[in-house]
């Protein structure tokens, strides 16, 4: 098992280039099986989750050519060999469920194990299944597998009880080949939804309204191949914004879409961080003035992203004052609190609320990366802690950040990866 060793850093200084979005590329890869023609994706991050999705697509019959040196993927699925996604792949990554909608749309059948992924709370797939049922699919569950089947998918009006990103993506992909018009209401509005819709439209789909709470889909009989460039990763962007702030450094972040990180910009500015948007990118300065506490509350987009809660909490532990952090998206997303407290932070939790008493001197310690974003938070905390911070279970981190070590080193951080 590998681990990271992180030393206290001088203020980070320099430039960093943001990679393509993990949360955008996975559904887009799944959508490529909706056609028997070639799809070419660029700005694809070289990540463990992407590798798992490549293996999943190959198991279904896709020809996948990886050119990670150029951040490209080519996917051609001339024939679906099986409608079943194997458990050994699904258990490694929750995003595997996104193959269900395209399989159902193209073949009339999809069978998949209930998915795995980070243990940050219950993320049931019932919203996905209800959406498929509304399109005319029959759902059968047995022995840990879920099967959806339909002779023909028929468009329908579908209201989501919660604006789930995965359910919005999955049902949208199923509906593009359904007969008639589908209206999806109370859907997720994340930039990743817009990116998927743009890719599907390039393939010949007819989707309007992505990025709002209502999406209209006019079904088509078939889709064709397309080329598409993945949007920048807004969570990686936010992580490096925090890195500049927590070390009181100055970092130019390139390849960003500022509109995608508005809540993070707003909250960092409230704390006293200076942020300038330039033609080159986003300049984040954490040393211009004393930094103070602020409160955050996670919400579906365009609210403050739950995927940035742990990183921001690490930052709040280092600034003056008391902060409230309210988590409304996942009920088990405070697992990093115990690890941060091991490093000297003063954080108390009650239900879905955490109170952070800031301006604590953090110390290096042995800590565990309990999930992807918690791992990133521990690295950020380690950059400010006296001594060495030893982070284990780093496979979580490497699921979602491309060239993680190299990018931090490029800004002056002292961090190494060692094999135990």
Image: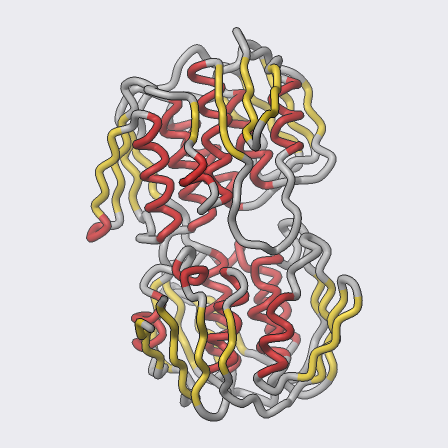
What residue is rendered at 54% in x and 15% in y?
149
In the picture, the quarter occupied by the C terminus is: bottom left
Q: In which quarter of the image is residue 201?
A: top left
| Front position in the image: 232 or 415 | 415
Q: How many marks?
A: 0
At x 60%, y 24%, the residue is 216
Residue 272 spot, x, y in % from top left: 61, 81
Q: In this view, does 221 lie above or below 81?
A: above
Which residue is situated farthest in the right direction here? 350
Q: Which residue is situated farthest in the front direction here?
A: 143
In the rendered image, which quarter contains the N terminus?
Answer: bottom left
Left or right, 131 with respect to 61, comes to right
Q: Where is residue 3 in the image (x, y as percent from the top left)?
A: 38, 72
Quarter of the rendering containing residue 2: bottom left
For residue 47, above or below residue 185: below
Nearer-the-camera pick, 319 or 93: 93
Q: Looking at this view, is 192 or 60 the one in front? A: 60
Which residue shows up at 49% across the image and 24% down it? 111
Query: In the visual, does 239 lie left or right of 183?
Result: left
Q: Position of residue 106 (x, y in %)?
A: 43, 17
Give the residue displayed 32% in from the left and 47% down from the top: 44
The answer to whether residue 360 is above or below residue 265 is: below
Tell me residue 402's x, y (percent): 35, 59
């Amino acid at each position: 098992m590998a681990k990271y060793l992180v030393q206290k850093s001088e203020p980070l200084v320099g430039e960093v280039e943001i990679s393509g979005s993990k949360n955008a590329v996975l559904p887009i890869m799944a959508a490529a099986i909706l056609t028997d023609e070639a799809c070419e994706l660029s700005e694809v991050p070289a990540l463990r989750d992407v590798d798992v999705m490549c293996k999943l697509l190959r198991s279904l019959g896709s020809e996948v050519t990886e050119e990670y040196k150029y951040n490209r993927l080519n996917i051609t699925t001339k024939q679906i060999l099986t409608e079943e996604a194997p458990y050994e792949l699904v258990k490694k990554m929750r995003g595997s469920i996104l193959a269900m909608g395209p399989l159902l749309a193209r073949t009339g059948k999809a069978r998949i194990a209930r998915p795995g992924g980070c243990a940050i709370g219950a993320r049931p797939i019932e919203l996905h299944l209800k959406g498929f049922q509304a399109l005319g699919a029959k759902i059968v569950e047995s022995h840990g597998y879920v099967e959806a089947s339909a002779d023909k998918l028929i468009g329908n009006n579908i209201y989501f009880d919660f604006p789930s990103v995965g359910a919005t993506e999955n049902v949208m992909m199923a509906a593009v080949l359904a007969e008639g018009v589908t209206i999806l209401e109370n859907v997720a509005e994340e930039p990743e939804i817009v990116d998927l819709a743009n890719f599907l439209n390039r393939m010949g789909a007819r989707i309007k309204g992505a990025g709002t709470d209502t999406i209209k889909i006019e079904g088509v009989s078939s889709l064709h191949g397309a080329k598409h460039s993945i949007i920048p990763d807004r969570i990686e962007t936010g992580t490096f914004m925090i890195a500049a702030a927590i070390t009181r450094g100055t970092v130019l972040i390139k390849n960003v879409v500022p509109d995608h990180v508005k809540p993070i910009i707003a909250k960092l500015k409230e704390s006293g961080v200076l942020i300038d948007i330039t033609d080159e990118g986003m300049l984040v300065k954490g040393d211009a003035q004393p930094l103070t506490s602020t409160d955050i509350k996670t919400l579906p987009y365009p609210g403050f992203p739950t995927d940035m809660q742990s990183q921001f909490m690490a930052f709040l532990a280092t600034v003056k004052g008391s902060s409230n952090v309210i988590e409304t998206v996942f009920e088990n997303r405070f697992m990093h609190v115990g690890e941060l407290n091991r490093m000297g932070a003063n954080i108390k939790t009650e239900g879905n609320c955490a109170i952070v008493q800031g301006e604590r001197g953090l110390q290096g310690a042995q800590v565990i990366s309990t999930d992807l974003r918690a791992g990133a938070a521990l690295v950020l905390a380690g950059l400010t802690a006296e001594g060495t911070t030893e982070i284990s279970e780093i496979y979580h981190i490497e699921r979602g950040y491309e060239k993680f070590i190299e990018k931090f080193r490029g800004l002056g951080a002292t961090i190494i990866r060692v094999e135990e």
